[in-house]
Image (cartoon, coloured by chain):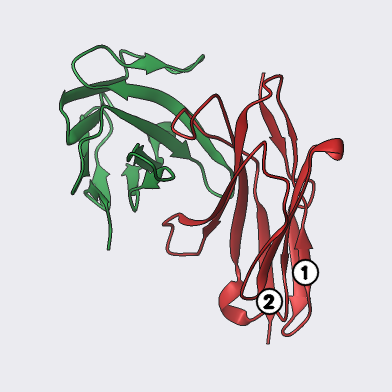
Chain colours: A green, B red
Amino acid sequence: GAVVSQHPSWVICKSGTSVKIECRSLDFQATTMFWYRQFPKQSLMLMATSNEGSKATYEQGVEKDKFLINHASLTLSTLTVTSAHPEDSSFYICSARRPNSPLHFGNGTRLTVT
Amino acid sequence: AQKVTQAQTEISVVEKEDVTLDCVYETRDTTYYLFWYKQPPSGELVFLIRRNSFDEQNEISGRYSWNFQKSTSSFNFTITASQVVDSAVYFCALSEGETSYDKVIFGPGTSLSVIP
């Protein structure tokens, strides 16, 4: 079964509002989670590394004030898209480290900003 | 810097044909991990294989096989007797470092269409 749960699966929001996406590790503690973004027919681009109890590490070109990441517990990381605009519409996928196992991915969140 | 190239953007094959998806990677590390993931139209990522840089043995799993050649920095994926359910986007990916737990960088993907 799934080991990483992502919620919601899809969300539609109005321009200017903020959207929060949750990523949970279901049966293990994840000190590190990763957030990816995927535009239609493109690859997954790493946005940031989420570290439990500390600040996230953002990839070059990713606005940290726009994409707020909080990893407050060992099983939950959240990505908040602040003041969303249509160009933020994308597929967001989280992943988590599980000991002695490949990276596990959530099922993704499809964000549409109108 | 790490980089993954998948030169084939789209491939179409007729059902039961064999198909090979190419993957070429770049890394300065001597220790690294390579992966293949499948992304069906529903969007979720399905893990297919992980291979570390010290293990060059080819692997076969059912209709899937992988050919890892460090000399050419390639990690190709072959599907034998393709089926319609194999239609998906396939990503080759690379993770540098001692474990496979560091950030994973994905190639651009190859979209495979298997025609009945």
Please name the amino acid that badge 1 sits on. Val
Q: Is residue B18 left or right of residue A97?
A: right
Q: Disc 2 marks which residue?
A: B114
| Residue that badge 1 annotates | B19
Decide if residue B28 is on the left or right side of residue A38.
right
Figure quadrant of residue A53: top left
- Please, what secondary structure does the residue beneath circle 2 have? strand
**Residue in the foreground of this view, choosing between A30 and B5:** A30
- Which residue corresponds to the image point at 56% horizontal and 77% vertical from the top-left? B85
Residue drawn 57% across the image and 42% down it: A43
- For disc 2, the chain is B
Give the image location of residue B96, x and y in percent: 58, 26
Q: Mark 2 near mark 1, Cβ–Cβ under 8 Å?
A: yes
Quick one: which residue is furthest to the right in this view? B71
How many angstroms separate mark 2 from mark 1 (CA)?
A: 10 Å
Q: Position of residue B20 (x, y in %)?
A: 78, 63
Mark nearer the N terminus (2 vs 1): 1
The answer to whether A109 is drawn above or below residue A48 in the figure is: below
The answer to whether A69 is drawn above or below residue B69 in the figure is above
Residue A49 appears anywhere in the view: yes
Work out whether residue A23 or residue B60 is closer to the camera in this orientation and state it.
B60
Give the label on residue B66, or none.
none
